[in-house]
Image (tube, rainbow, N blue to C red):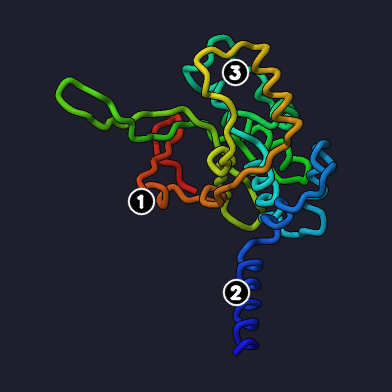
Amino acid sequence: MIKRFLFLCVLFFSCGVFAVSMGERRALSIPKGQDDNMPRLVHHLTDNIPDKTEQAKAIAVWIASHIAYDHDLNSTYRIASSKAGQSGDDVFKNRIGICSGFSDLYEKMLRQVGIRSEKVYGYVVENAPTQTKAKLMVKKEKIGHVWTKVHIPGRLPLLVDTTWMARGSFGGTKKRHSEMARKREIRQNKRENKSYAHNMKYFDFDYADLMNQGEYRFSTMRQLIKK
């Protein structure tokens, strides 16, 4: 009975381990000191991984699990700052960004391993509650957004949204937030170098699947993009 129990435990654990792809495992096992330099990090993420899709996945998972979404730059709480500082280098350095910064960092890291990609500019449509005198209504709200199309030889392009893969958040909680306080919090965030959960649903996603789940994503031409 005990042997059978141990066998089932080993089987369950093995299935859990192998359910995670090579690229995802690599991204979640970065040694300390390997993530402060972008070329060194990209080398560690992709070394001895011959499959380009797994390389793209490793990079996307690292971004999603180490870069926090900067609500200060995309909310009504901010009172002074522009959306500057969204280059890939800035986002990598500060460990925070919005969709344009996430996609720029992803494109820059992919380029270092010879993977071609391009930004997709468009918008998503979300349900937004609106209070009227008569009742609470729900309207469709268009929100500007950027994601990535990754070109892997021998297969259809991958659609990857590293912003929506990410679960970390930064700022967006204070009505008054000075530039000095913001810079101090950014330095603290960099020192902590946190790890966050990530959502693989938005790696190699399909527009039709998202529509079936109630999520809508369109290009700036207002036409549904096909893979």
Q: Separation of disc 1 and disc 2 at Cα?
A: 32 Å
Residue 138 x/y as whole percent:
26, 32
Image check: 76 left or right of 32?
Answer: left
Residue type, label 2: Phe
Residue 129 x/y as whole percent:
30, 30
Q: Earlier in the sequence, mark 1 or mark 3?
A: 3
Determine the secondary structure under disc 2. Answer: helix
**In this figure, which residue is indicated by the disc labeled 1?**
212
Determine the secondary structure under disc 1. Answer: helix
Image quadrant containing the N terminus: bottom right
Query: Would you say the residues marked 1 and 2 are in contact, meaning their CB atoms lie under 8 Å apart?
Result: no
Residue drawn 46% across the image and 46% down it = 226
* Disc sitting over residue 83 in the figure: 3
**In this figure, which residue is indicated by the disc labeled 2?**
12
Q: Earlier in the sequence, mark 1 or mark 2?
A: 2
Q: Separation of disc 1 and disc 3 at Cα?
A: 33 Å
Residue type, label 3: Lys
Q: Separation of disc 2 and disc 3 at Cα?
A: 46 Å
Query: Would you say the residues marked 2 and 3 are in contact, meaning their CB atoms lie under 8 Å apart?
Result: no
Residue drawn 53% across the image and 47% down it = 202
Residue 78 x/y as whole percent:
53, 15
Residue type, label 1: Asn
Which quarter of the figure has residue 8? bottom right
In the rendered image, the residue lying farthest to the front is: 2
Determine the secondary structure under disc 3. Answer: loop
